[in-house]
């Protein structure tokens, strides 16, 4: 019985996902401000489709990578809502400078005590390479920077220490 329920659920999820993916492409062309030609818009819509198509796996990865009290069970819902809002207000003259950290953004942070800057590019797990400054949005640093804003001060909790930082600059870098 459980197996048949699981198979039904996976089929339902697959059908539902494909409907959402079509909705995003239609919405991108019809209601979300004129043009899909801008690379930033195209990249963010691709992110929404990817997240929607892989939501179960991404939620499982997110929950496995996040400690108990830090778990945000509506994380992807909040992320999607933020991107939808950004796309609704999108103007094709936007520069790559951003106010909010999204996947694909390069974030400049200032370590408050040392007065030193460092840049990270927030990416999907399969593109992460910490040596090059590409950190997964599921990593401790990436997870805490995502959806934060320019000028925001926070305490980054890393496996080694807690560090006070300020977000100095956000620029969209990865046009998928």
Image: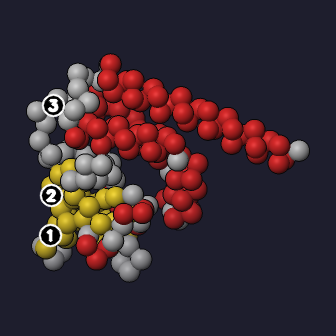
Helix, strand or loop for disc 3:
loop
Q: Earlier in the sequence, mark 1 or mark 2?
A: 1
Residue farthest to the right?
1
> Which residue is more in the foreground, 173 or 141?
173
The residue that appears at 17% across and 29% down in the rendered structure is 91
Which of label 3 and label 2 is nearer to you?
3
Q: How are the colours assigned in the image?
A: secondary structure
Task: Give coordinates of residue 166: x percent, y percent.
Answer: 20, 61
The residue that disc 3 covers is 92
Are the residues tagged 3 and 1 within 8 Å (C-beta)?
Answer: no
Q: Quadrant of the N terminus?
A: top right
The residue that disc 1 covers is 117
The residue that appears at 13% across and 36% down in the rendered structure is 94
Q: Could you tell me how far apart the alpha carbons at marks 3 and 1 are, in whole angstroms?
A: 30 Å
Quadrant of the rendered structure where residue 39 is?
top left
Q: How many C-alpha atoms fall within 10 Å of the one at disc 2: few (<14), some, or many (≥20)?
A: some
> Which residue is more in the foreground, 174 or 79?
174
Are the residues tagged 1 and 2 within 8 Å (C-beta)?
Answer: yes
Tag shown at residue 172: none
Residue farthest to the top?
30
Q: Could you tell me how far apart the alpha carbons at marks 3 and 2 are, in whole angstroms?
A: 24 Å
The residue that disc 2 covers is 168
Residue farthest to the bottom?
160
């Amino acid at each position: 019985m459980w197996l048949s329920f699981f198979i039904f659920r996976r089929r339902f999820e697959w059908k539902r996902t494909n409907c959402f993916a079509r909705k995003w492409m239609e919405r991108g062309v019809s209601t979300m401000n004129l043009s899909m030609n801008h690379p930033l818009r195209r990249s963010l819509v691709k992110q929404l489709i990817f997240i929607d198509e892989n939501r179960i796996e991404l939620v499982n990865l997110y929950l496995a990578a996040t400690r108990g009290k830090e778990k945000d069970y509506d994380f992807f819902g909040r992320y999607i809502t933020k991107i939808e809002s950004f796309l609704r207000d999108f103007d094709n003259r936007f520069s790559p400078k951003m106010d909010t950290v999204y996947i694909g953004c390069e974030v400049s942070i200032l370590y408050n005590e040392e007065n030193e800057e460092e840049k990270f590019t927030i990416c999907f797990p399969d593109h992460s390479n910490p040596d090059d400054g590409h950190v997964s949005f599921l990593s401790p640093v990436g997870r805490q920077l995502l959806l934060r804003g320019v000028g925001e001060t926070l305490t980054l909790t890393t496996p080694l220490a807690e560090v006070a930082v300020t977000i100095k600059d956000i620029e969209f870098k990865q046009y998928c």
